[in-house]
Image (tube, grey):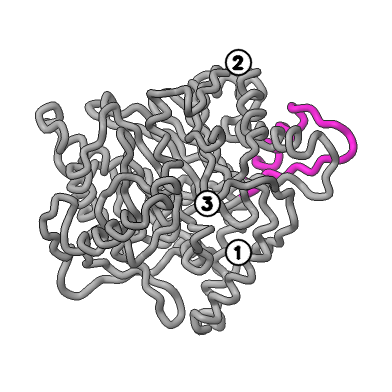
Amino acid sequence: MKDKKANKNNKKNEKIKGSSVINENIIGDEKEIKQDNKDKKDSKKSGSDGKKREPRKRGKLSWDKLDNTATLFPVIATQEMSNVYRIAVNLNEEVDEEILEEAVHRVVEQIPLFGMRLREGVFWYYFEENNKPLPRVMEETQVPGAYINKTRNNQYMFRVTYYKCRINLEVFHALTDGFGGSIFLKEIVYQYLRLKHPEDLKDEKDKISSGIFLDSEDSYVKNFKKNKKYKKYKSSKAVTLEGEKFVNGKLGVMHGFMKFSEVRAASKKRGLTINQYIVGMFVYAVYKEYLNSSASKYPISCCVPVNLRPYYDSHTLKNFFAMVSADFQPDDREYTCDEVLNIVKENLEEKITKKNLDDILSYNVSNEKNMLLRIIPITVKKFALRRVYGASTHATTATITNIGNFKLKEPYEKYVENFYCILSMSKGQNMKGAVLSYNGILNINFSSCLTDTSIQKRFFKLIEQDGVEIAVETNGVYYE
């Protein structure tokens, strides 16, 4: 396995280095921080080019409801648990800040969901059209998935930054899930490249791609089945990954790049889908490295978000996913890799069915439809939601999400090297994984606040032993 450590990899690690540069830059110079804060205030009136930015829209502001899942995120979001995810793209050339900012402006005007701000009502949070200038596009200065300060971000729920050849889109999960975020980022890339290379892309239309639905319905409520007898879900304690953590809020990032065709062949050989294969290998890595192949009082529970759009013929840009889990609780005997993989396979096959997804959807929406609960003031709801969420945080060992296969139009492909996704940490989860593929390359990313990397290394080693060649990169914090 090619272990490309940050301090030994000049070319590719430069593109990832920004993921850990934050704390060194921020803590070092208070004068810089004060000046930066002043710049941010000035940015409310001016763009990165110094030109005056007018409010985006005038007149009466439109508003919209949060989707069923989104109602939780504003309640539980903190500096330490931001509920912000990052989807990033590496270009084959350095990013032009002014052109990127112009591209973001043009795309936001065409995708209204990203032009909203979050407001607190009497009974629920809600979206309101944001007529403030968009926040400046700036060079990256924070860890991936850092908390989005609404005041400093002109009330927008996303930010766009860059570092050398990389463009980062970071989204507060109340706004949309990975599906919506990926569409937004691809449109920014298209618009940016049209502005940067007008002659080469002169035949491309300067508008949102055809086939993009700007649907912002709450698909949870739309597909809720009244009077349905649904199963109630109770959470139970799972294995928690503990250990020494990074100081000063640093985040460890480790990417594994491999050929999609090789991973597909390896999973097919074991009779698994790619998702089952990746989740199963992770669970087995936890079993071998964290539990040392020992029995456990609690199960290893890997949470897997499921995109619900294909199951309900939905095209919404808002959140529309369900959480299922793959659980493995070892007893006194030692399990083989194949045994664990089959247990994970059976778990996911049982839970990722239309019937079970119907039950999850109905259970999640039922409280929102309850008239007695609807009239409770939001201050009481927030207290109750925090209590419920706090009680459930011990039920998951880690989360692994698959964003899917990224496809770009042919004229743009030559400018893009790869995409990847990074998840921020949650209470009780000190490690998360995100998977996506682009142009025949599968990228499996692990983000962690733990200094130990034995689980990630075991995971990649297991896949390599199945005949998959892997290149591993990190953001360098593991070697400082």
Front residue (pair 137, 307): 137
- Is disc 1 placed on a helix, strand or loop? helix
Work out whether mark 2 precedes mark 3 in sequence or the reverse, and give the earlier one: 3
Q: Is residue 213 left or right of residue 179?
A: left
Q: Inspect this view and state whether residue 9 appears.
A: yes
Q: Position of residue 68 (x, y in %)?
A: 48, 64
Say if mark 2 contacts mark 3, CB within 8 Å.
no
Single out the residue that lies furthest toward the top.
Answer: 467
| Quadrant assignment, res 227 | bottom right
- The reply to whether residue 215 is visible in this rendering is no
Q: Is residue 117 left or right of residue 326?
A: left
Whether 114 is drawn above or below 203: the answer is below
The magenta region covers: 324-352
Local packing at callout 3 (Cα closer than 10 Å; few below 14, some 14-19, many 20+) is: few
Q: SS of the residue at dot 3?
A: loop
Report if residue 326 lies within the magenta region.
yes
Amino acid type for the residue under numbered disc 1: Tyr
Residue 412 among magenta residues: no
> What residue lies at 18% left-to-right and 44% top-to-bottom?
98
* Res 467 label: 2
Going from the N terminus, do you reach mark 2 or mark 1 first?
1
Given this view, does label 2 or label 1 mark the residue nearer the observer? Answer: 2
Which of the two discs, 3 and 1, labels the residue nearer the N terminus?
3
Residue 363 shows which numbered tag?
1
